[in-house]
Amino acid sequence: MRPVALLTDFGLSDHYVGVLHAVLEREAPGVVRLDLGHAFDPGDVWAASFQLRCAWPHLPGDCVVLAVVDPGVGTFRRAAALAIGDRLVVAPDNGLATAIGPAAEVVTLDWRRMGLEEPSATFNGRDLFAPAAARLAAGADLLSLGEDLVSNSLLPCPLPAPVRTGSGIEGTILHVDRFGNLVTNVRAEDHADVTTAAFVGRIARLVRTYAEARPDEVVLLEGSAGYLELAINCGSAADATSLERGDPVLFNK
Amino acid sequence: MRPVALLTDFGLSDHYVGVLHAVLEREAPGVVRLDLGHAFDPGDVWAASFQLRCAWPHLPGDCVVLAVVDPGVGTFRRAAALAIGDRLVVAPDNGLATAIGPAAEVVTLDWRRMGLEEPSATFNGRDLFAPAAARLAAGADLLSLGEDLVSNSLLPCPLPAPVRTGSGIEGTILHVDRFGNLVTNVRAEDHADVTTAAFVGRIARLVRTYAEARPDEVVLLEGSAGYLELAINCGSAADATSLERGDPVLFNK
Amino acid sequence: MRPVALLTDFGLSDHYVGVLHAVLEREAPGVVRLDLGHAFDPGDVWAASFQLRCAWPHLPGDCVVLAVVDPGVGTFRRAAALAIGDRLVVAPDNGLATAIGPAAEVVTLDWRRMGLEEPSATFNGRDLFAPAAARLAAGADLLSLGEDLVSNSLLPCPLPAPVRTGSGIEGTILHVDRFGNLVTNVRAEDHADVTTAAFVGRIARLVRTYAEARPDEVVLLEGSAGYLELAINCGSAADATSLERGDPVLFNK
């Protein structure tokens, strides 16, 4: 049986996450379950996509990801299941389903084809997504869950990609972590020649560890998920720069 | 082995929840464990009862529920284990044990009969309830844990039931969720003829989805747990009405 | 396979804890995982040591503890794995590794000997500690993870021990819990003759249960983890006394 990794915006003060776990265990007894996080801001597809992207390389090879951040529940947004490499993803078609990248195969979930009761208008995580993930964990084919779909008809993930321009690599801040580090969308291994980052009239130089930074210096370094980030040793780069999620950073040799 | 679903008010900043899990694994190695929630207000039997009631229909069929919200620990309140359908519940006799409804069989937990050390005066969750749940998970009979008890001598759950009167169904708000929705104790399927809800001089009409509501209109709809709730599309019904947990709502055709 | 108990300061709003679980499942499929807590203040080795010490007696007998509170990540602090009784501990050598007491065997983790990629400078929990815990869970020897180390060369745990003096037992407040109870480092079973505690000119008498205290009286009693604590029935001893973590308390017959 495949393990299932859960990622939602349900928070931890209601029964919602517990019920997803219960449905998984009920429908696929003994299934291995992993919590990737449930405390994202409600409806924040951007944040959930970012966290999923960071965790992805470290998941079990045959994992099923059950990702439910679903502000459009009860409307006509589609529900999707995808195959990406040997892993499978179940998620709403609101940008979260495409957080990782191109899929080899995509279906739209169909509760009738799955033989389920009609899902409630407010909790598809419990009524549609978790049962789909449980079946995939137990070995079901994607096509037993719904209709085949052309992959590139899914809504694009809201996370912007870096852009190469005449003046360098234009990146974007994807995440401000709880230490005030500003994590961008530029992967260090994809841009090994980058040595500086420019933002609001300032320049940060690339260092390997925090210890190389001078006091209060905003530096550029590779964070734990492989992205270049702006940081201050023992301080908050967010406070020092007033930069926020979505702001641009220009990378150069 | 039966899976165990845990629900407590222990919070997540201490070792208490972890120790319950450890005791379960120590006493019943390999037991499947599910967290239904641990972030309820300390001692809030009402909230824990509500969340357990919402999760109940979705739990594995042979689940053991380990529910510990226990402000009376160390006093003479009894500890109970119950059989309800194919499921078992272990909980203090403070109203939480009766959150789900009538039990076919009830025992009061007896540490001597279980061969345990005398429980501490402050952490019966670890010393009494979790060992009892572990034994039930591993297949023990209720009567191996303590003395048979007449079910209706347990303290009643604090959640009020709706009352049918000459002027309609008198319901009560059981829960204000984090979106400001006001969840009542009236189950939609039990009262299919309800079309309006009256509260503090106002009337809300029944709709099926949020999208049917006009801007700022307080509407009545069936929530994900099957209860009728007052809600505002993209807004907080709690803020708009000043209604709180425990307030009355009158339902009519 | 041994179960693994996780304790970190990673919080619950990022993917970090989820990734530890993912690495454990990836490297030791089917391993039993227990969360002992992840919401300690970042870098607070004292708090993590205290919580681990409280949970320790209740863990499965053959448990592997994966404890990562690691403000020194990326510097030259060593990483350790220890055998204590039948249990194993994996932790940074910053005082957390010695929270429980003397080890029969200690090694410093060596990523080369383990055949791992070089760990990132910022997330050794994922890249070094979790892989080490997974191998121990699967049955590896300590010496397969790194070099033998003399146990007493590890950094001492920051939690102070009580001191016997001419005037009694000098204890220290280790923890203020969320009810305002002041938990000291004096174990009741080690000091069965203690009957009073003196602090800032006041005296508290030993009671067995909260119910024995008079209204607003600060009393001394044995808490659930076996330590003597100052408490007020239905009140906060921290507020009433202004005592804090690290403050002294003098115990007498």
Image (cartoon, coloured by chain):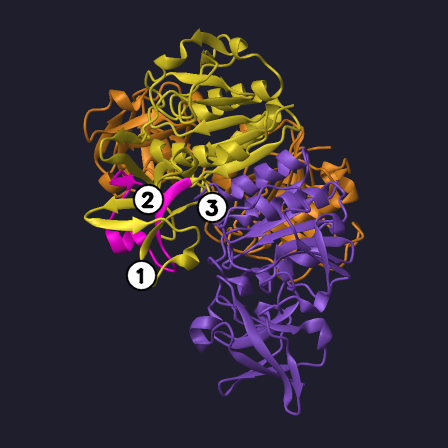
Chain colours: A purple, B yellow, C orange
Residue tagged 1: B216
Which three-letter amino acid code belongs to the residue tagged 2?
A: Glu
Secondary element under disc 1, as helix, strand or loop, is loop
Visible residue check, residue B115: no
Magenta-drawn segment: B227-253
Residue tagged 2: C244
Q: Mark 2, mark 1: which one is toward the viewer?
A: 1
Q: Residue A123: where, in percent of width, then height?
A: 51, 48
Residue at image coords 56%, 35%: B34
Which three-letter amino acid code belongs to the residue tagged 3?
A: Leu
Q: Is residue C37 left or right of residue C93?
A: left
Which three-letter amino acid code belongs to the residue tagged 1?
A: Asp
Q: In this view, does A39 lie to the left or right of A165?
A: left
Task: Let me know if residue A201 is in the magenta part.
Answer: no
Residue at image coords 60%, 34%: C102
- Which quadrant is the C terminus of chain A positioned in? bottom right
Q: Do labels 2 and 1 share a chain?
A: no
Q: Residue C101 carries which label?
A: none
Visible residue check, residue A246: yes
Residue at image coords 46%, 57%: A42
